[in-house]
Every structure is written in C-alpha cells, then in structure tokens.
Image: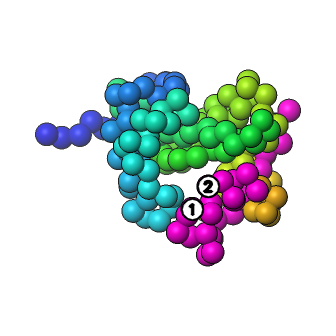
Amino acid sequence: MPQPDLTRAVASVTPIIRPAAIHDVPEIHHLLEIYAAQGNLLPRTMNELYRHLRDFFVIEINGHVAACAALEIFTESLGEVRSLVVADEFKGKGLGRLLVERVAEEARTIELKRLMALTYVAPFFHKLGFKTVAKDTLPEKVWGICVKCYKFNNCDETAVLLELR
C-alpha cells in the first residue's frame, strides 16, 4: 500500500499543533526510534511515552504525526525541550521551530523561568533565542537525568538555555 505524499500535504494544509493523544504514541515512538537509531537522541519505550504523554505536543498533517516535542519539568524554575523530532520529509519546513515555540509558550504559561535543551544542533536553538551554557549550570538535569545516561562521562551534546520572560 503506497504511503501518502505528506510533503505535498504540508504545502496545501495548515499543520495542526496540539497536545499529543493516546492514539499518537505509536507514531511518536516510530519517529523517536529513527532518531535514536541515528544516535541523535536516547530511545524511549512505549510505556515511557504513555506515562509522559501529557508532556508532548505533536504536529499533525493529514491525520499523521509529522513532528513532536515534549516539555519536561525539573523544578519550579527549569524545564527542558525533549524528544524534538521532525519526520525526514518535513525537515526544513519550520515544524521544529513551531514546536519549540509551543513548548516555550507552555513553559511561560506555567511560569517556568528557564527552558533548556541538550542538543546536537545548537545553531537551530540559537536562532530561537537560546544561548549555549555549561552543563554544570543545569544540575537539575545533569544529576536528575544525565547521570543515568550511558553517555554521562562522554556526553557530546551542547546545553542551550532560554531565559523566559
């Protein structure tokens, strides 16, 4: 069965940005698996995605998840953009930017003061107002999550931070 041409669809319809729903989890998981296989993010299990579903926003195009991102909260002042992925056919079309802006909007709504990310694409985040920072300025992340990561002693990601107003 041929797959729908989603690339053409994005030009002809407005992407829908919305909170993730239970039925989105398999498609979110599939996108995350692709990025994890490339070494661009850590894998997440289906069970973990169901448990953290309310953290996620998706961009839906023609009934399919084209991109997703999550807001993880660490403290009363710090949150993180996590699991930001865009399907290959939609890269370069602004969907990642839309999701980071939506996550930042949510962070402001709940009155977080700072939003961070660990990333391999720091220039993308810089365009959105994030600044590169030392990882040790984010102990909530480093000692809460990173310490459990197999890359902990050899982390090659860049920490970026956005001060929310």
Q: Residues in magenta?
A: 139-165
What kind of residue is marked 1?
Answer: Lys
Magenta stretch holds residue 144: yes
Judge by depth and name the residue closer to the eye, 22 or 98: 22
Q: Coloring scheme of the render?
A: rainbow
The circle on residue 34 is: none
- Whether residue 42 is situated above or below residue 14 in the rendered picture: below
Tell me the number on the disc at residue 148.
Answer: 1
Q: Report the side of 163 relative to 3 (left or right).
A: right
Q: Position of residue 24 (x, y in %)?
A: 38, 32
Q: CA distance from mark 2 to mark 1?
A: 6 Å
Q: Position of residue 21 (x, y in %)?
A: 42, 26
Q: Position of residue 42 (x, y in %)?
A: 49, 58
* Relative to 149, 137 lies left or right: right
Mark 2 surroundings within 10 Å by alpha-carbon count, few (fewer than 14), some (14 through 19), many (20 or more): few
Left or right: residue 109 compared with residue 86:
right
What residue is disc 2 on?
145
Looking at the image, which is closer to me, 50 or 16?
50
Neighbor class of circle 1 (other Cα within 10 Å; few <14, some 14-19, many 20+) is: few
Image quarter of residue 27: top left
Q: Is residue 97 visible?
A: no
- Which of the 4 quarters of the picture holds residue 63? top left
Q: Nearer the viewer, residue 148 or 163?
A: 148
Q: Is residue 37 above or below residue 126?
A: below
Q: Name the residue: 83% across, 42% down.
A: 163
Three-letter amino acid code of the residue under disc 2: Ile
**Which image quarter is the N terminus in?**
top left
Q: Residue at x 69, y 63 (%)?
A: 158
